[in-house]
Image (spheres, rainbow, N blue to C red):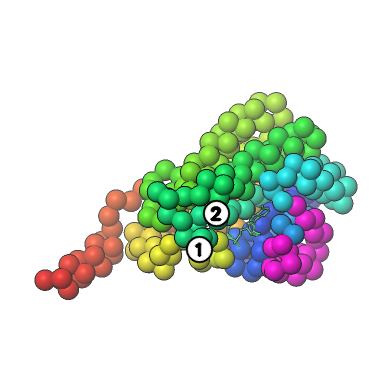
Amino acid sequence: MTYNLLKGKKGIIFGALNEKSIAWRIALKAHDEGANFTLTNLPSSIRLGETENLCKITNSSLIPADTTNINDLENLLNNSMEILGGKIDFILHSVAMSYNVRKNRDYDDVDYDFFTKTIDISALSFHKLLQSAKKLDAINEWGSVVALSYIASKRTLHGYNDMADAKALLESIARSFGYIYGKEKKVRVNTVSQSPTKTTAGSGVKGIQGLLDFTERMSPLGNASADECADFCITLFSDLTRKITMQNIYHDGGFSSMGMSLKAMTQYNKCLDEEE
Ligand SMILES: NC(=O)c1ccc[n+]([C@@H]2O[C@H](COP(=O)([O-])OP(=O)(O)OC[C@H]3O[C@@H](n4cnc5c(N)ncnc54)[C@H](O)[C@@H]3O)[C@@H](O)[C@H]2O)c1
């Protein structure tokens, strides 16, 4: 069912690599809800992934950009305003990458060049995007900027590595920049903390299968899918949520408020029985 929630709105969507990407699902919903937007991704991801197909499906233009590069971001913002015919109403930042995770460098043996890249790509890029947009006055009043986060920003999850630090910084940037952007331009800035989801980046998380099973058993509503995340992000881009800003909002079926559930306890007890 569609509601035309984004009718007439102009956006920029980062990070749709393939149809599993959370950004891909959000782009499809934004299109269904009447938005016009540009898509962007890293040139190497565009070559390896399927972003160009999504452009055809959603009738959108593709503007390559490395989120860590200010010139790329300014070019993206300027070109998007030209193509879409005016200032932007919503931006999705759905970008993360850790070479330490990729190269199996544990958190107590990280490579610091990799660590710096993790922070730059996965968190600082959000600040660069917001600062560039504000300097260019690229976002309309009551516009909405959303980045995707994960609960490892606040709680330690085995193997999440330096991405946990990146997510903590990402959420902090949403608060700090959200204050300034809200006060001066009435632009909203939020992060959505999503359940573990089987995407290309998600599959890189250590023990993802066990993690998905654990969070599914722990969450009273079950894990949130990428499509459900898309539904939620559409509401944040819409005019229905105009006074929500500087928040990190959990979209995780209730997981973040749980300590122990009956389903998880039952499974855990089975393992204890096996040990006896
Ligand atoms: N999958 C999960 O379990 C999960 C859970 C919570 C939050 N998230 C977050 O959701 C977001 C999207 O991840 P996903 O799970 O859809 O995976 P994904 O692999 O589909 O998306 C990650 C995207 O980041 C892009 N990217 C990497 N480096 C870039 C750079 N320098 N410049 C521009 N783009 C770059 C990739 O090309 C890719 O499109 C990430 O921020 C991730 O941390 C994912």
- Element at badge 2? loop
Q: How far apart in space, not on screen, are marks 2 and 1 (Cα)?
A: 9 Å
Mark 2, residues whose alpha carbon is within 10 Å: few (<14), some, or many (≥20)? Answer: many
Badge 2 amino acid: Ser
Residue type at mark 1 is: Gly
In the rendered structure, the answer to whether residue 220 lies left or right of residue 81 reads left
Front residue (pair 200, 194)? 200
Residue 254 visible at all: no
Residue 12 visible here = yes
Residue 99 or residue 239, whichever sits in front: 99
Task: Tell me, yes or no, whether the highlighted magenta stretch contains residue 227.
Answer: no
| Residue pictured at 40% horizontal, 48% vertical | 108
The answer to whether 187 appears left or right of 211 in the picture is right
Percent of width and height locating residue 117:
59, 47
Dividing the picture into quadrants, the one containing residue 21 is bottom right
Q: Residue 33 location in percent, x, y?
A: 71, 58
Residue bearing the label numbered 1: 204
Q: Bounds of the magenta span?
A: 44-65
**First in residue order: circle 2 vs circle 1:** 2
